[in-house]
Image (cartoon, rainbow, N blue to C red):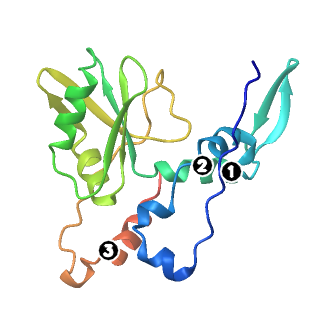
Amino acid sequence: MEEVHNPQPKPAKLSYAKATQQPVEALFQYDPVRAAKKTFQDYAMRRIGSDSSYKGEPGIIYSPKETAALAARLKFALVGKFSHGLPNMNFLRIRIVKLGFKGNVSVGRLNFKHVLIRLSNEEDFYRIWLRGEWTFDSFHMRVFKWTPDFDPQIESPIAPVWIRLPALPVHLFEKNALFTLVLKLGNH
């Protein structure tokens, strides 16, 4: 017995008038055959990095500019370090979200001691970072600013510093004026 394959019928062409009368969902139907034919290479991507090798093993080298561009999406990311055990991730996510953020927040595990806290809002970022230490039930977490060269084996050299400016005139309590003053202290 010969197997018969019936080709999928082509959708009828619609006039603008008919298309605008149909519900939007009817215009965008999923085509499993077309979706199955798409491969990873079908997506246009800009190649970054330079081919390299080390001791005969292939590798990629990213320029400082490329590294900075890749890291930019993590500009409001923090690393939470739990020195004496990591709580259940669902528990931790719920507790962190309950802190009430203005923007989005996501929490992911980096290893058995560290979590990555990704924030979308600068104010939320500073609120978490400047406090420095948090406790969730009996789990103590120290917070560090994430950097592209983050290494879980090394303590972060970046820490928030409080600066006191006694008798600062009121008209200098403006973001740009304060940043100009603080830059004189250094950016280390």
Question: Tag 3 or tag 1, which sits nearer the N-term?
Answer: 1
Closer to the camera in the image, 163 or 43 = 43
Left or right of 160, for residue 133 = left
Res 22 → quadrant: bottom left
Res 113 → quadrant: top left
The answer to whether residue 182 is above or below residue 113 is below
Q: Which mark is residue 175?
A: 3
Q: Which mark is residue 97?
A: none
Q: Residues within 10 Å of mark 2 (few under 14, many from 20)?
A: few
Q: Residues within 10 Å of mark 1 (few under 14, many from 20)?
A: few
Amino acid type of the residue that numbered disc 3 sits on in the rendered structure = Lys
| C-alpha span from label 2 to label 1 | 6 Å
| C-alpha span from label 1 to label 3 | 30 Å
Q: Is residue 184 visible?
A: no
Q: Secondary structure at mark 3?
A: helix
Q: Residues within 10 Å of mark 3 (few under 14, many from 20)?
A: few
Q: Residue at x 42, y 42 (%)?
A: 158
Q: Which mark is residue 66?
A: 1
